[in-house]
Image: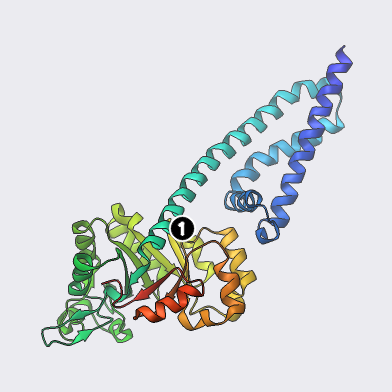
Amino acid sequence: MENNKGDKAVKTVYIAGILLLVLCVYYLFLKDRADLVTIDFFAKAARHFADNSIKYLIFAGPAAVLIILVLVMKTKLLKRLLPVFLACCAVVFAVTAIDAVRLHKREAGINGMRNVFLQERYIIHAGGRITGEDGQAYDYTNSVEALENSCRNGKSRLCELDFRRTADDMIVCSHDKADSGLSLAEIMDKKSEGLFTPITLESLAEIMRKYPDIIIITDIKEDRIEICRRIRDNAPELIDRFVIQIQHEEDYEPVRELGFDYILYTLYNTEDWERTPGALKRMICRYDVVNLTFWDSWADDPAFMEPVSALGVPVFLHTVNDEETAGHYTGLGADGFYTDVLGL
């Protein structure tokens, strides 16, 4: 009877060891190639283990040592070690379950934001078109007046703004590269187009609190991580209403570590190899991006547009300012557009 119990214990350890070995092999060899796995569950599992590698190694290390010990030592010692081994396994499974719930909750939020993009359809570009006192229409102002006008009258609650650092290390919304060589006071005095008030982090937070439905998409061409940190620190309670544009896959993790859940991938500054359908599929399998964004002219290439529009995330094009063009690209698979005027 004693030997039978020992044999069963040995078999239990063998099975557990094999399962752990399979999991480790899968993690090591497929975590960065989730596109090779067609079943969505396994693709998500690969990403999950990649994101939590340190945590799992801490628990899997002692478990692996115990497996080796119990395979080479006598049954009597095995019986003493088995409870410890099973306790380690229980801890690993508990951590996995907790992380799975957290991951599911985050994915539900990202899917919710994707649905917002699909419903709104338009992203109002650089604050939106605004008419000055001179009767002329202006784009790219990134101004308080333009954003306020879009919040009051816009058909979409998605607004994109350009962010940059000033010469005195402040943050301002501006599309003009020359503004990086000016102090904030000089930019505010110069005004946008000489007419409109530039947006600062403080004034942006005030507008977002005034219009609680508005969602801001960031366009940060330089110093992206530092500016994201300033955005977070200026108004941490508003962080879930920012969608951060990244321009390279390597930017995803640093932005996520700052606490931003909503990240979109814009392709106009990527290298050719970064935007192949295969590379984009790997990126989307590994990371949860809200959408993909690229030039409208790229959608005219079916070899690019067809596989990309089938990846399962919204595809937005920029910049489209007339309904006929929007209708053309919608027929090619586009889900929405950056626009100066259509969403107003």
Quick check: can you spot residue 298?
yes
Q: Position of residue 170 (x, y in %)?
A: 27, 72
Q: Quadrant of residue 114?
A: bottom left
Q: Is residue 189 left or right of residue 221?
A: left
Q: Residue furthest left?
A: 133
Residue type at mark 1 is Arg
Q: Residue at x 76, y 45 (%)?
A: 22
Q: Residue at x 49, y 43 (%)?
A: 102
Q: Secondary structure at mark 1?
A: helix
Q: Quadrant of residue 220?
A: bottom left
Q: Position of residue 344 (x, y in %)?
A: 25, 72
Q: Position of residue 157 (x, y in %)?
A: 29, 63
Q: Position of residue 56 (x, y in %)?
A: 63, 44
Q: Is residue 200 left or right of residue 113?
A: left
Tell me if residue 107 comes above or below residue 94 in the rendering: below
Closer to the camera, 261 or 146?
A: 146
Q: Residue at x 82, y 33 (%)?
A: 14
Q: Is residue 135 left or right of residue 102?
A: left
Tell me if residue 320 comes above or below residue 206 in the rendering: below
Q: Is residue 174 left or right of residue 259?
A: left
Residue linked to disc 1: 256
Tell me if residue 249 comes above or below residue 176 in the rendering: above
Q: Residue at x 62, y 35 (%)?
A: 93
Tell me if residue 4 comes above or below residue 231 in the rendering: above
